[in-house]
Amino acid sequence: MRCNCGCNMDQDLEKNESEAKISCPKCRIEGIGVPTDVLRSILKGELLEHVNQDSRYLLCLNANCEISYFPTSNTRMFTTSDLKRPIWFKARANPQIACYCNNITYKQVQEAVSVRKLTTWKDIVGSYRKKIIYKCNKLNPTGLCCTENFQDVVHKAKLKSKANS
Ligand SMILES: [Zn+2]
């Protein structure tokens, strides 16, 4: 299945399946493999020297674990406070970001839905940004397209604004 946000990414996780068996060293929950480019673009600048180019990196999917990315090799892992921007599904992420390419927060999505009655990714992002960027494979913390989670935020915002009206 292809996404519809315009990054034109293949959403199938098949290519990651073989990597999905590696667990976070701290919480022991399986992580997902991410391109090293993703790690490099979200990591604080002063930590880039600790990225091991020969290693693969995985993202810890556990909301309550402070580890963000961990290597398959025996080198340094990173916590959520090593990142320039929070990962939306981690506990205490602030702000929660719905679209990393265009830096749109949950709050902005909620406002677009409840005040301006917008519902599509394109309309919402377009209402905040003149120039829309499509670089999920590099800017999203998972390396995957943000559309699915974005639509989920829109859906919840719709329910909320209905309940409040
Ligand atoms: Zn973990």
Image: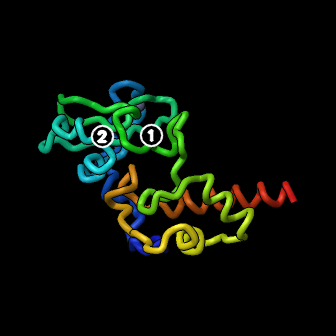
Q: Quadrant of residue 72?
A: top left
Q: Report the front residue among 119 and 59.
A: 119
- Labels 1 and 2: the sequence-earlier one: 2
Mark 2 residue crowding within 10 angstroms, few (<14) / some (14–19) / many (20+): some
- The structure residue drawn at horizontal position 43% and vertical position 74%, both measured from the top left corner, is 131
What kind of element bears circle 2?
loop
Identify the residue position indicated by label 1 in the image: 61
Viewer can see residue 109:
yes
Inspect the image, locate mark 1, and give the three-letter code of the amino acid beneath it.
Answer: Leu
Q: Which mark is residue 44?
A: 2
x%, y% of residue 52?
A: 15, 39
> Would residue 64 appear left or right of 8 to someone viewing this image?
right
Q: Check the image and report above or below for 28 versus 22.
A: above
Q: Relative to the observer, which residue lies in front, 101 or 59?
A: 101
Q: Residue at x 59, y 74 (%)?
A: 123
Q: Label 1 CB, ligand 1: below 8 Å?
A: yes
Q: Quadrant of the C terminus?
A: bottom right
Residue 143 in the image, given as x and y percentages of width and height: 35, 55
Residue 152, numbered label? none
Q: Position of residue 22 (x, y in %)?
A: 31, 37
The amino acid on which the numbered mark 2 sits, given as a three-letter code, is Lys
Which callout, 1 or 2, points to the residue nearer the camera? 2
